[in-house]
Amino acid sequence: MKNTLLITGGAGYLGQHLISHAGSWRTHATYFQTPPPEGLQTTWHHCDLRDGGRVKELITSLHPDVIIHTACSNRSLEEIEAIVPAARNLAQGAKESPCRLIHLSSDLVFDGEDAPYDEKSRPKPINDYGQAKAEAEHSVAALFPKAAIVRTSLMYGMDPVDHQSRWLLDGLNKGQTIQLFTDEIRCPIWIHTLTECLLELTRMDFSGMLNIAGPDPLTRWEFGLGILALHNRTPTERIVPSTRAEAGLIRPRDLTLNIEKVKHILNIPLLSLREVHQRHYSRDSTSVKPTVESTS
């Protein structure tokens, strides 16, 4: 009977949600720089995933049935540089164990000029993080073809609030001017939806690439207004539309992911931001409704 799940990056936003909703799984979670939060029912392991010997030792001792690899972010150069060796070590460890591996990747492996992107689209990153994630995908697929590689987009949630939403809400509270791009498109996904999808994958023998993202392509402007509505906040005149060019930034223009494949594989509804809002305020008919329209 399958019962042991290893979650890398357990102290991160997605990792915490996976631990909290793992159900009958006996979970183990790794952490490195971020201390483990209190109150989560799991067994913690301090592990530098760049250390192949330590990764092999951990997998050998735990004998996990499934590994969900969420660790390594884009918050610092050190973390970006850890993406490829961490993925390589986990893929090698899963292969030798053997166990199932679900590797989290990103829509940022693309340049944003040929959307929508399906599972067969070839990566063409334009920044260091995207390049590292693309190389990690390649390493995992080459070392352990039985792995599932999940490309996703912006994650958001309310309990707790995700980092990007917190940035927006804090800026609003402080009366800061906040620029939201009207020319950058992503497919934001509710953290509970992504968590449910990944946990359903743990119970399946799926391998290969899979896009899991929200159903509506939204500009950063549309997404920002939707997040404010989700938190029942009214935008002020200091929340202003802008563009990547005006900000002097080089970022992918349109990272819309085609999610038709996952709709046929999983039984989890991929909720839009509007649907998440309606679900959250279903008991309050007077709540402010989001003014978010799809750009598709």
Image (spheres, grey):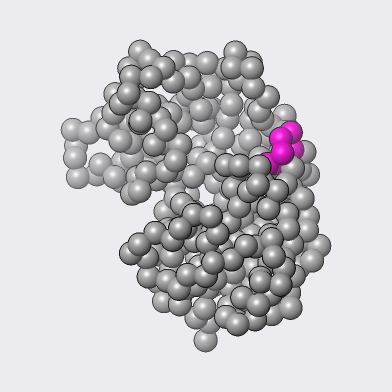
Relative to 91, 294 lies left or right: left
Relative to 83, 2 lies left or right: left
Who is closer to the viewer here, 106 or 205? 106
Q: Where residue 204 sits in the image (x, y, percent)?
A: 58, 71
Relative to 146, 142 lies left or right: right
Q: Decide if residue 51 is in sight here.
A: yes
What's the magenta region? Answer: 125-130
Q: Quadrant of the C terminus?
A: top right
Give the answer, above or below, for where 216 lies relative to 143: above
Q: Where residue 35 sits in the image (x, y, percent)?
A: 45, 58
Give the answer, above or below, for where 215 lies relative to 60: above
Give the answer, above or below, for where 186 lies relative to 259: above
Who is closer to the viewer here, 133 or 32? 32
Residue most extreme to the bottom: 1
Kindly identify the residue that appears in the image at 66 percent across and 42 percent down. Answer: 77
Who is closer to the viewer here, 167 or 95? 167
Kindly identify the residue that appears in the image at 70 percent across and 41 percent down. Answer: 130
Q: Decide if residue 269 is in sight here.
A: no
Magenta stretch containing residue 9, yes or no?
no
